[in-house]
Amino acid sequence: MARADVVLDCSDNFATRHAINRACVRHRKPLVSGAAIRFDGQAAVFDLRRPDSACYHCLFPEGEDLEEVRCAVMGVFAPIVGIIGATQAAEALKLIIGCGKTLDGRLLLLDGLAMEWRSVALGRDPGCTVCAASA
């Protein structure tokens, strides 16, 4: 991880996502996160090189009673995976070449049944036990 320019998380469980996030925070590496389940998808960038950027834990705190739903169990509409994966690839390339506005500070949500996108602003949690402690 220390030699990576950008990390893409395409896993389908919270334990792995949180482990990847902790490593990105430790090494101050940008994290491009993507997830898909059923007909829904989401993508976000956590640019951990920036001191004001949220981390994955700020959005989904570890240890909270979040229902673990995995696409391997719940299923996923295959085109959603492609759409989210292409979004992650675009965000990673923008981070690498330093152009455009990334999703840092936003969670992009896709409703595949209605084919509608929604963007939600993300803020850093000043009490985050992962990124606030490393600031």
Image: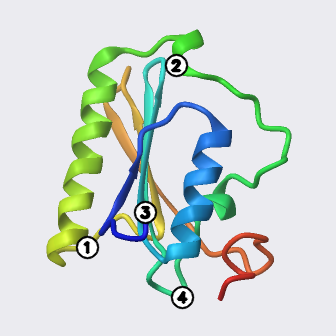
- Residue 19 position in % (x across, y down): 63, 52
Mark 4 — residue? 51
Mark 2 — residue? 71
- Residue 15 is left or right of residue 26, and the answer is right
The span from disc 3 to disc 4 (Cα, nearest Å) is 19 Å
Q: Label 3 crowding class (10 Å Cα cut-off): few <14, some 14-19, many 20+? A: few
Mark 3 — residue? 1
Query: Which residue type carries mark 4?
Result: Pro
Give the image quarter of residue 32: bottom left
Q: Label 4 crowding class (10 Å Cα cut-off): few <14, some 14-19, many 20+? A: few
Earlier along the polypeptide chain: callout 1 or callout 4? 4
- Residue 98 is left or right of residue 120, and the answer is left
Q: Nearer the viewer, mark 1 or mark 4?
A: 4
- Residue 94 position in % (x across, y down): 19, 67
Earlier along the polypeptide chain: callout 3 or callout 4? 3
Of the 4 image quadrants, the one containing the N terminus is: bottom left
Q: Nearer the viewer, mark 1 or mark 3?
A: 3
The span from disc 2 to disc 1 (Cα, nearest Å) is 29 Å
Residue 91 numbered tag? none
Query: Which residue type carries mark 3?
Result: Met
Q: Label 1 crowding class (10 Å Cα cut-off): few <14, some 14-19, many 20+? A: few
- Residue 84 position in % (x across, y down): 32, 38
Q: Nearer the viewer, mark 2 or mark 1?
A: 2
Mark 1 — residue? 101
Residue at 65% x, 39% y is 14
The span from disc 2 to disc 4 (Cα, nearest Å) is 33 Å
- The answer to whether 100 is drawn above or below residue 106 in the figure is below
Residue at 77% x, 51% y is 62
Query: Which residue type carries mark 1?
Result: Lys
The span from disc 2 to disc 3 (Cα, nearest Å) is 26 Å
The answer to whether mark 2 and mark 4 are in CB contact below 8 A is no
Q: Label 2 crowding class (10 Å Cα cut-off): few <14, some 14-19, many 20+? A: some
